[in-house]
Amino acid sequence: MSQPSNADTMTPREVVEAVYEGMLRSDRDALQSLIDPSIRIRVTKELAYGGDYQGPSGFLELFKNTFTLIKSRIEIDHMFTIGEHQVVAIGRTSGIGLGSGQHFDAEIVHLWTVRNGKLLSFDAFVEDAPITAAINGTATA
């Protein structure tokens, strides 16, 4: 069960940390409480679930599209704030392709824009080859 968000008093970094915690728990209510209605999302287009998404329904669609193909866990190694509204998170995602059972481990960089305690944009830069190979059940180069 999600807890009420006090996002309007949270720093951008705290909002992003709350998003990762919500993802870890698969807590849709917590995630939706942190999303601005006009959120814009861009994910590495080379991924099967990559592309542009818009609004809260787009945010949920991205996660549905992703977790139909892979089971993964994100580990953030480093996070820093740029100016007043942006947060960069650098880390890895690892897991398996659901159709193939093949393991992957890929580097990620996430750029988040937060205003008034809400996510305005999310840009995900993802090392695509390992994930694509796991989805397709093929060897990586």
Image: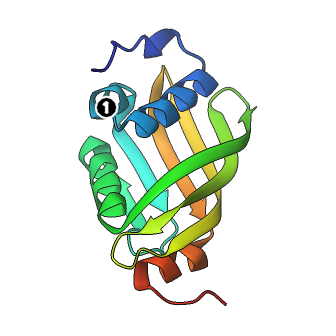
In the rendered image, the vertical position of residue 134 relative to residue 95, given as above or below: below
Q: Residue 104, position in %: x, y?
A: 56, 70
Name the one closer to the observer, 10 or 70.
70
14 in relation to 61, above or below: above
Percent position (x, y) of residue 64?
28, 56
Q: Secondary structure at mark 1?
A: helix
Q: Residue at x 64, y 58 (%)?
A: 108
Question: Mark 1 — residue?
Answer: 32
Q: Is residue 141 above or below residue 109?
A: below
Q: Residue at x 42, y 74 (%)?
A: 101
Q: What coloring was used for the rendering?
A: rainbow
- The quarter of the picture where the C terminus appears is bottom right
Furthest toward the left, the residue is 57
Question: Which residue is drawn at the image coordinates 59% and 25% (left, top)?
Answer: 12
With respect to residue 82, does 100 lie above or below?
below
Find residue 124 and report its horizontal and vertical position in percent: 55, 56
Viewer-proximal residue among 44 and 64: 64
- Note whether residue 120 is visible: yes
Q: Is residue 46 visible?
A: no
Quadrant for residue 24, please give it: top left
Q: Residue at x 46, y 74 (%)?
A: 47
